[in-house]
Image (cartoon, coloured by chain):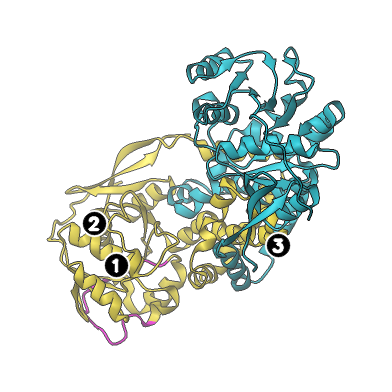
Chain colours: A yellow, B cyan
């Protein structure tokens, strides 16, 4: 891993398109961090709510442009808006390959796909929380042609709102989130629907394990369907991995689940150069970037298992 | 439904065998409710902890004897203890048919199987919480030969610690908990183990939906395995119902899960006589008993759907 100097420049302004739970929370967190931030939403109520929180409402976008819109709207979110031709564009979508396929050809190295791993079953601008990103992992894509300095500016923005940045490729990201997000959403829906079928007595007896296991079934169904359909291939393959686990003898299955759920989450500090291969290796090891220094990025990887 | 007078007698003493999370919490809640309560545990540390909370430690059991021991210990929990031959015996086990088969022949109408639908992934006497039963459903079995007045005394005890009593048969209970407890435990284990297999990057990106979906995988594996194996037939059949849901087209599955998870939980008050058929009908409608009057039991059923 070769270290090389990383230029220190003033933080660019951030322009967020879409001011629902994620986009609105990002603008609120950036306002709190003292960063210049503007926002736009097709919904006047969301614009008004953002303005009341100190966000400049504007159709002129420059610096880092964040697409915080639902996946189906990603390709048209910039229509009718004025975008600085040198702007870096990132998004907060829950799948990365389809967004990259859509925006990559148009934006090239100026596009940096992103996905903050947070959000709750609530949605919309009334669910805005400036602390939403604190301690969250934020996947940030480094493709072959991604400009590493643009990647760094987006990473700095994520770090400024309290997140830890996980370097990934879009394809690796989509496989990973199928296992840890899309399958949990599908299982929660299936569990809730199956208990519903079992009748009122079963529902009346439902307690902690059922509530936990079905919590995300309360999420907006249009959002969940778009998320899963947007990652159709990995999401269709992942339930089979869960099924293979369910086919194990119960004591073995329960012990494996317990070991996985209770593995100590140790971490050790590392320094990583702004280098695609080094950063992707950090992400594959389960690590994240937490800070930038002059020439290095601070981060962590899990303790050796 | 015929109403008939229910005798009002002084509350009997309660003797709890097993002072871990459930048994210890029950004694603590009964002490808080001003009920006479004694306890016994094979572990001296658990006995000492209970004594420090105002519980009389004794091997002489009378009144309502509560077996709060793990399922495999249920048949031998009374060995070496002195039990009043007129005592009513109940248990807190998570499956009811095997306990009934084990204790029913010995105790007949004196045995009233029970299952409070609470408890957390913590266990043991250090996890004792006198508020554990507040608002919880407590399934209480009414078999053909259950003495309804003994059933009522146990129900009154459950109500005294803040629970709502769901009248069930052991078989109905075991089918219901397979759907709302045993399958969630198995799915949580399978989800955690499958994500573990997917590698460190997936684990590093795991967020809300994964944490919720795997929370109960942190439960004591011996406890979970005993619980599921103790309800082997219903627990083996229930995952197929979840699988059938997973086979539906995603938009349909997600919509069904959302509808089930967000159905308003309305309730209306009803009065029910102390009559097995009437009480079981209340339970099958998803209702519960909340109070006893002179001749009636107060309860609720869900609003008509």
Chain of the residue displaying label 1: A
Residue where numbered disc 3 is placed: A197
Horizontally, residue B153 falls left or right of residue B121, namely right
Name the N-terminal-most of marks 3 and 2.
Answer: 2
Is label 2 in a helix, a strand or a loop?
helix
Disc on res. B49: none
How much space separates mark 2 and mark 1, taking CA atoms? 18 Å
- Range of the magenta residues? A76-93
How much space separates mark 3 and mark 1, taking CA atoms? 38 Å
Horizontally, residue A185 falls left or right of residue A39, namely right
* Location of residue A240 in the rendering, given as x and y in whole percent from the top left corner: 66, 56
Q: Is residue B286 visible?
A: yes
Which residue is rendered at x = 13% and y = 60% of the image? A9
Which residue is rendered at x = 46% and y = 66% of the image? A95
The reply to whether discs 3 and 2 touch (Cβ–Cβ < 8 Å) is: no
Residue where numbered disc 1 is placed: A24
Viewer-nearest residue: A207 or A56: A207
In the figure, B126 relative to B244: above or below?
above
Is A116 one of the magenta-colored residues? no
């Amino acid at each position: 891993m070769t270290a090389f100097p990383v230029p220190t420049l003033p933080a660019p302004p951030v322009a967020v398109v879409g001011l629902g739970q994620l986009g609105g929370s990002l603008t609120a967190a950036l306002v709190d961090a003292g960063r210049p931030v503007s926002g736009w939403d097709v919904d006047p109520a969301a614009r008004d709510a953002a303005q009341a929180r100190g966000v400049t409402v504007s159709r002129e976008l420059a610096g880092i442009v964040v697409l915080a819109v639902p996946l189906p709207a990603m390709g048209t979110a910039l229509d009718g808006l004025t975008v600085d031709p040198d702007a870096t564009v990132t998004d907060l979508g829950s799948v990365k390959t389809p967004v990259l396929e859509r925006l990559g050809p148009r934006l090239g190295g100026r596009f940096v796909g992103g996905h903050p791993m947070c959000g709750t079953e609530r949605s919309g601008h009334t669910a805005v929380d400036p602390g939403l990103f604190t301690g969250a992992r934020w996947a940030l894509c480094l493709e072959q042609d991604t400009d590493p300095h643009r990647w760094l500016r987006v990473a700095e923005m994520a770090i400024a709102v309290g997140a830890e940045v996980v370097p990934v490729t879009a394809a690796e990201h989509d496989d990973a989130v199928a296992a840890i997000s899309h399958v949990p959403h599908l299982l929660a829906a299936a569990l809730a629907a199956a208990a519903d079928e079992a009748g009122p007595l079963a529902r009346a007896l439902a307690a902690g394990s059922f509530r936990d296991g079905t919590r995300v079934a309360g999420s907006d169904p249009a959002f969940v369907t778009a998320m899963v359909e947007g990652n159709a291939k990995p999401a269709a393959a992942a339930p089979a991995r869960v099924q293979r686990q369910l086919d194990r003898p119960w004591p073995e299955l329960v012990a494996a689940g317990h070991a996985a759920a209770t593995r100590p989450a140790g971490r050790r500090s590392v320094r990583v150069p702004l280098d695609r291969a080094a950063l992707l290796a950090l992400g594959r090891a389960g690590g994240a970037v937490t800070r930038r220094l002059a020439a290095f990025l601070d981060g962590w990887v899990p303790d050796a298992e």
